[in-house]
Structures are given as structure tokens and as C-alpha cells.
Image (cartoon, helix red, strand yellow):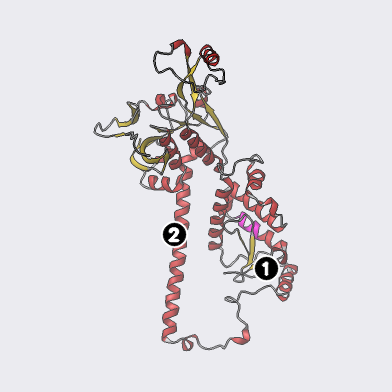
Amino acid sequence: MDEEDPPAEIEKELIEHALYEVLDSPIFRSSKQCHLFLSYIVKHSLAHQDDLLRERVIGASVFGRPPNYDTGNDPIVRSRAAEVRKRLAQYYLDHQDDSTIQISIPTGSYRAFFSRNHRSHPADGLEGSHETTDAMERQTSAGIPEHVELTIAKEEVEIKPFGRRLSNRSWVLLTALLVIVAISFGGLALLKWQDQRRNHLFEQFWTPFTRGSKTTLIYIGSSPSLHFSPSYVEQYRVQHPDRNPGPGTFVDIPSSGSIPTKDLVPFNASIGFGDVAAAARVASTLVSFGQKYDLRYGSDISISDMRSSPVVLIGGYSNSWTLQVTHDLRYTLEFGDRIVDHKDNSKEWQRKANSTSLAQNDYAILSRLTNSKTGGTVLVIAGIGGSGNQAAADFVSDPLQLDRLLENAPSGWETMNMQVVLHTETINGVPKGADVQAVYFW
């Protein structure tokens, strides 16, 4: 493990050159956000501007977030930092012997650290630069720590035939060490391949909603409710002068008698917490791809909107567009409390309410329609209840879970329609996760 050298003690030219080589590699050229993030971190780390390396400041400066945005609901900086750390590890795994300076961002920090790699030549990539070579020599003579495990003074080494110096026990230890190293590098290569594959499947799933310049619409359904008419509220205020009710205020309803229907006004703009949580999760995922989104609800969407832009519909029975888009698909919401399979009448998934327990269950349907009846691309997140919506949004925003789902998908699934039936257990209405019940591609 290389020892860290303070940035001030390493030629700025060397660090900037190392950064250029990293950013110019295929690993970083494929991600504009990772490219911008690493450039910003290195620049302000070199300048010792720790006040500019805070999460909210980075979110505003690099990713265009408002200066006071909620970092708890928008983890863009944390997710990009984790991605950059993985990409740096992949880069240095492929460039172990030709990186003069190595850049790292320790977990829990947004400050870059720089260390020498003595396995490479100080002037690699800077051939003909005598000033750079002399600068490196001056730094070494000035007391920059050498890497003990990689640097051995020549006068301490007795040159002998290699075979004579090793005992049988040494050969066993050396062989074991080589095996461990081989397994370690094999494991790292496997993890690298698995991580790239997982991210690739995740990106392919979301590509219809992130490609091009069109803004993705997120539409949340709303639940119907009844409000009291202004005349009823005024009458109640006269009878209860100590209160100040409004149309949506709870009032004491008489235990006998009835309320005239003229005093009950339909109101269709109530949004559940599970729907809001689902929308926030989807929005965060779109932002991680650098995709713009527009949040809609109530009557603020039309068929022309859905034809001209990719759309994410959130809500089952609360979303009229969901019911219209999915009513003739294989899996649909039916009878207010279940999902039915129209190709196999023996299958259905019913939510069973239990008023005596905090633990409940819920189901949801994910429908990814690359060619929907609206004429556009639609992702439908339709839970029987609000917790189902939240669990389904969490599922579709998780690369690990999508990887498990898509690893056995049929060839060409990227352009196919698909539906997934999900089940979740909830505590006090909060889902604990989701498991797949059925999948269908066509």
C-alpha cells in the first residue's frame, strides 16, 4: 500500500497529468458526471479548499442543485462519489505499473489524496522532461517517505542464485503467496466484470427514459375525497365560535341524522405518502443519469404529453392513466384488492388487510412499455396501496435487484414490453423490500 504524500509536496504538474490520464481513460470517458465530479474534487483538494468539498456545495456546483437542496432526499453526490471510487479502483487495477501518481477519495470524505506509485517510472508519460525528473529527485532527497515494501537499498542485497536462497519451506510460502495473489486479482477482475454488467443492465432498463433531450414526465395519481361546502363550514362556525374550520378541516359529525349531499364537495387532489416517496425515488434515479424530469399530478397531463415525452406513471387505483394504459395487459389490478393473471386464471395475488397487526402485505405491478397504447414509452408503478408503489419504485431504482431480475431475460428484452408482479411486507405502512412473484416479456 503506497504511503500518502501531502499534495503540497508533490509537483502540481504531476498530479494534473495523472488526473488527465485518468479522465482520458475509457472508464471515465463513459460518464460525464464522474468526469466532472473527479475534476472538481482534485482541483479543490489541491487548493486546500475544504469548505468547497462539502456535500451540498458539491451538489450545487457540479450537479446544478439549488444551494439549499435536501441531501437526504437527493443522494446524487454520495452515489457519484461511490461510483468514482469504483472507477478509480478499476483504472488502477488496469494501470498498476504506469501510474506515477495515484488519486484516491477515502470513504466518508470528498477530499482527494495523492500517493506515489514506485512501481512506475517517475517520468512515465513525460518523456524528455528533465525538469520533472529533477523535481522528483529533489522531493525524494527532501525526505518524502519511500515505500519500504517496494524499495530496497542495493548494498543490503546479496546477489545469489535464486534457487539456492530458498528453502523448501520458503518455496511453500512463496507458492502460497502467489496463489493468494492470483485469487485476489481474479476476484477483483470478477467483481469488476459483475459491477460493469450490473450497471449495464440497469442503464439498459432506464435507457428509454433517459436518452435524447426530452424531459421525462413523472405523473402521480390522486385519491378522491370529500370536502364540506362553504355553507356547511359557515354554519358549523356559527355553532362553534371557538373554532375556525375550513373546507378540509375535521369537524364533529352528528351521531344521528345525515349530511345533505349538496354539502359534500368532491375533491380529487389528495396524494398519499407512498406515492410521494415513490416519485422521489424515481426522480433521484433520473437525476443520477443526468436526466431532466417534470413532476405532474391531478389533471395536469394530457395524451399529447404522453405521446411526446417518456412518462413514469405512479399509482394504481389512484391513477386513472394507469388503469387506462394497463387494463388489457396480462397482469392487472382488479376488485380493489388484488392482481390477476389473465393468461392463467389460477393465479392471483390478493392484499389481505389485518386491522389487529402493524404488519401488512401489499402487491404491485411494474409495467415497462416501450410501445404503449399512448404511442409513447411508459413505465407504470402500480401498487394496490401506497406501500406497494413505494416498494416497486425502490425495486426499479436498485441496480442489484434489477440485475437479478434481468440476468435471465430473453434476448432482445431491451426493446420488449415487460411486466413484473412484486410482493412486499410492510410495518406501519413502510415497505421492507420487494420480492418477484411473476415476470412476463413480449
Nearer to us in this view, 337 or 160: 337
Q: Residue at x 39, y 48 (%)?
A: 404
Q: Main secondary structure of the magenta part?
A: helix
Q: Is residue 5 left or right of residue 188?
A: right
Residue 86 in the image: x percent, y percent?
53, 56
Farthest residue in the right direction?
131
SS state under label 2:
helix
Q: Tell me, yes or no, whether the two marked residues, 2 and 1, touch with CB atoms within 8 Å.
A: no
Determine the image quadrant of residue 287: top right
Q: Could you tell which of marks 2 and 1 lies nearer the N-terminus?
A: 1
- Residue drawn at x 65%, y 60% is 18
Badge 1 crowding class, 10 Å Cα cut-off, few under 14, some 14 to 19, many 20 or more, is some
Q: Position of residue 126 (x, y in %)?
A: 68, 65
Which structural element holds mark 1? loop
Rendered view: 77 above or below 151:
above
Residue 153 visible, this angle: yes
Amino acid type indicated by mark 2:
Leu
172 w.r.t. 361: above or below: below
The span from disc 2 to disc 1 (Cα, nearest Å) is 32 Å
Which residue appears at 41% of the width and 46% of the height?
Answer: 401
Residue position marked by numbered label 1 in the rendering: 123
In the rendered image, which quarter contains the N terminus?
A: bottom right
Residue 114's place in the image compared with 52, above or below, is below
Amino acid tagged 1: Ala
Q: Position of residue 97 (x, y in %)?
A: 57, 68
Q: Which residue is denoted by mark 2 in the rendering?
A: 190
Question: Over which residues does the magenta segment extend?
Answer: 18-24
